[in-house]
Amino acid sequence: MRKPIAISELLAQGKAKLERLKAGAEAASETLAAVQRALPPEVAGRVWGASLSEDGQLTVLTESGSWASRVRYVMPEVAAAVAAALGRTVERTSIRVRPRPAPEVGRR
């Protein structure tokens, strides 16, 4: 039979994972804000996600192919602005088409 584990111990083990998730979410939010500031206003509203990986890959999520094309057109300037804003190097870029997540309805 296994020895029971205290709840405080279980929470401490999970805390590291939660901290990594929180840090990742904050980094993605900062990257998205930097990307949206660098884009023309009419395009910025159509970008809903962005991340910059440790190896310098900037990934931008748009809601349709036509918006992805517009983002691709200005990406060299955007990548430079994001690199300057975040103090990191952007080695390559990727624009992906993904529908926006549906808003949660009825959540309390």
Image: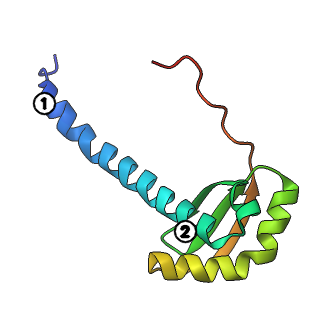
Q: Is residue 23 visible?
A: yes
Amino acid carrying label 1: it is Ser
Q: Secondary structure at mark 2?
A: helix
* Rendered image: mark on residue 8: 1
* Residue 91 appears in view: no
Alpha carbons under labels 2 and 1: distance apart:
38 Å
Left or right of 64, for residue 104: left
The colour scheme of the drawn protein is: rainbow
Q: Residue at x 66, y 61 (%)?
A: 60
Q: Which residue is found at the position 22% from the left and 40% from the top?
A: 13
| Amino acid at circle 2 | Ala
Q: Quadrant of the C terminus?
A: top left
Residue drawn at (52%, 67%) of the image? 53
Tell me the crowding category of disc 2: few under 14, some 14 to 19, or many 20 or more residues within 10 angstroms, Cα based. many
Q: Which residue is mark 2?
A: 34
Query: Which residue is the extreme one toward the front?
Result: 41
Q: Nearer the viewer, mark 2 or mark 1?
A: 2
- The one nearer the camera, 17 or 23, is 23
Expressed as whole percent of the image width and height from the top left, the position of residue 32 reads 56, 60
Is there a contact, CB below 8 Å, between mark 2 and mark 1?
Answer: no
Residue 6 or 48: which is nearer the viewer? 48
**Left-right relation of 17 to 28:** left
Q: Position of residue 48 (x, y in %)?
A: 65, 52
In the rendered image, the vertical position of residue 1 relative to residue 38, given as above or below: above
